[in-house]
Image (cartoon, rainbow, N blue to C red):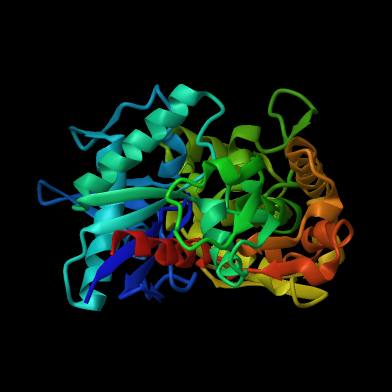
Amino acid sequence: MSVAFGLDFGTSNSSLAACVDGNAELLDIDRDNPVKMSLKSVLYFLRENKETRSFVGFDAVRKYIETEAAGRYMQSIKSFLPDQTFDKTEIFNKYYELEELIGFILRTIKKRGEEILNRDVTSVVLGRPVSFSEDPEKDKLAEKRLYKAAQLAGFKEIIFQLEPVAAALSFENKLGYGEEKNVLVGDFGAGTSDFTILRASKNYQIKPDRSEDILASDGVYIGGDLFDSDIMWEKICKYYGKDVKAKSLMSNNFSSLPSDITNKLKHWNLIPLLRSKNTLYSISNYKYLTDNDDKYLIQNLENLIKDNYGYMLFQAIENAKCELSNSDLSSVFLSNYDILINETVLRSEFEKYITDKVLKIEECVKSVIKNAAISEDAIDAVFLTGGSSYIPIIQKVFKDRFNPAIIKQSDAFTSVAYGLGLHAKLLL
């Protein structure tokens, strides 16, 4: 039995496919992850009994919550690949290079895949974006680092394939030999939304280098995490003192919570940063200066920080957001930690919150078509992947511009990995 992996190392979630005797199949490498068939691309380091332990995926999230953020939590590590200023970081008096950190994640993915297949696998097709950076030197650095991380994880035969090419491979495989089609791939991640137009064709021989088939590529730093933050700010932050005014002891002036507090409140992974002694002291003073009727709201904020339940709160927010893709209303529900939240969110409200971001996405789509130097009518297929691709107002951007019949919804989180698995035939 010949086996090679197709591995999609993502900014927020990673997924794995195995090419077994020429057939691709997805592997469930993090069964506890709410995002099925994927592993959270996060690391958590904890110092216990004078020993540093590392946790990966949902295990890292769980340990982070259990230990009340006592260790070092790291996410979005992929985004640092082209960053020349990020060389190494100190964790509990030991320095780790970026490649080592990513290697922890890739090694865990490799090990879990091997356990499922009950055999060693040392060959992998790694996904990579069309461009890690507009700077060619930074782009080379990013790929070099990812390659080294894969080596540290234990892979011996490593090749790269472009992520949008992988996402479109299932479509390409259905073409007749010699047939060519122009495909627009929209990949909506947690932190970015990327768009690529590529020339798809069916050939007798699989081409390892598909860069010449990329007609244009562009992206914006807008993704699912920002949409969650919008709901948090517009609907939920009021439960934590967003609108509370405190009267100054020295004058009749009123003030709101400091922006450095409310800005962190919008992101679950930044909430633990509010646990510093000075910040908690500042919040306590603020509570003292508020009206008695509002003190409980600032107490909610203190509980959120001290009990470290930001992750659970944002899970409730994300669930509500996802429900809005199929319903006109949903609710953010949380009943724990001395608070009850049952806040209705209308789809129309949500769409209003993210309108400015959707307009930027639309402009990016226009830009990539213009840069490809082809007409909209020359686009033969549109592939949308990633969780936010299911949001109706985002789908409307494409339905208004293209014939709905050519728009295909790829599996939100695994289409790239599956395509990489198909491409792994090259290694068999």
Q: Quadrant of residue 368?
A: top right
Q: Quadrant of residue 341?
A: bottom right
Q: Position of residue 193 (x, y in %)?
A: 64, 48
Q: Position of residue 164 (x, y in %)?
A: 57, 53
The residue at the far left in this view is: 50
* For residue 32, side relative to residue 163 (left or right): left
* For residue 120, side relative to residue 420 (left or right): left
| Position above or below: 310 against 287 | below
Q: Position of residue 200 (x, y in %)?
A: 62, 56
Identify the residue shown where x is 76% and y is 60%.
380
Looking at the rendered image, the quarter that the N terminus falls into is: bottom left
Given residues 65 and 19, the one toward you in this image is: 19
Given residues 344 and 186, the one toward you in this image is: 186
Given residues 246 and 158, the one toward you in this image is: 158
Looking at the rendered image, the quarter that the C terminus falls into is: bottom left
Q: Is residue 190 visible?
A: yes
* For residue 301, side relative to residue 289 (left or right): left
Q: Position of residue 146 (x, y in %)?
A: 34, 41
Q: Is residue 55 visible?
A: no
Q: How many marks?
A: 0
Given residues 366 and 85, the one toward you in this image is: 366
| Position above or below: 260 against 416 | above
| Position above or below: 344 against 188 | below
Identify the residue shown where x is 30% and y is 59%.
427
